[in-house]
Image: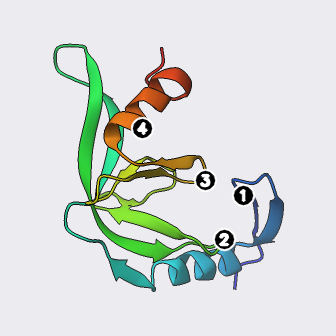
Amino acid sequence: MSGDQVHFTTKRGETFRTTQHKWDLAYYRETQHLIPAAAGTFYLEWAEQEDGSYRWDKSVVLAWGLGIEGYLVPIGTDGIDERSRPVLHPSGLVTKGLEGEWMSFEDFARWDREYGVSKG
């Protein structure tokens, strides 16, 4: 068992310290509880295109995992989303971590142009 210490801060600003072994166990357990995502669920990523322009790209969300703080986190082909990317649900609803939810992609895009990553 390792005695190395791990320090981390939650999205809410709470700071914790634990051993590397306990952190590894907690992180491992996080991926043990998976719920399949509905077909048509996607991450949205603000990405540069080949022509130098930017737009929202979609990546498939495969499942939902139970997060360490007790809420669901999306899991895609690139693993667990640690960055709270927006998620487009099959109903058209867009959610973005603790920042909010929008009834449509268009509503989310309007909000993002004013406050989010695409505003500049």
Image quadrant where residue 26 sits: bottom right
Viewer-nearest of discs 2 and 4? 4
Residue at (39% x, 31% y) in the render: 109
Q: Quadrant of the N terminus?
A: bottom right
- Type of amino acid at the residue the image marks with label 3: Leu
Residue 58 position within the rendered picture, expressed as x and y whole percent measured from the top left? 24, 45
Q: Earlier in the sequence, mark 1 or mark 4?
A: 1
Q: Is residue 35 left or right of residue 12?
A: left
Q: Earlier in the sequence, mark 2 or mark 4?
A: 2
Judge by depth and name the residue closer to the eye, 43 or 49. 43
Q: Which residue is mark 2?
A: 69
Contact? badges 1 and 2 (CB < 8 Å): yes
- Type of amino acid at the residue the image marks with label 2: Glu
Q: From what the image shows, is residue 47 above or below residue 40? A: above
Query: How far is disc 2 from disc 4 in space, using C-alphas?
Result: 25 Å
Q: From what the image shows, is residue 15 above or below residue 28? A: above
Residue at (49% x, 31% y) in the render: 111
Viewer-nearest of discs 1 and 4? 4
Q: From what the image shows, is residue 5 above or below residue 111? A: below
Residue lying furthest left in this view? 50
Neighbour tally class for label 1: few under 14, some 14-19, many 20 plus, Cα within 10 Å: few
Contact? badges 3 and 4 (CB < 8 Å): no
- Residue 10 is tagged as 1
Contact? badges 1 and 4 (CB < 8 Å): no
- Residue 89 is tagged as none
- Residue 98 is tagged as 3
Q: Which residue is mark 4?
A: 108
Q: Is residue 30 left or right of residue 26?
A: left
Q: From what the image shows, is residue 79 above or below residue 29? A: above
Q: Secondary structure at mark 4?
A: helix
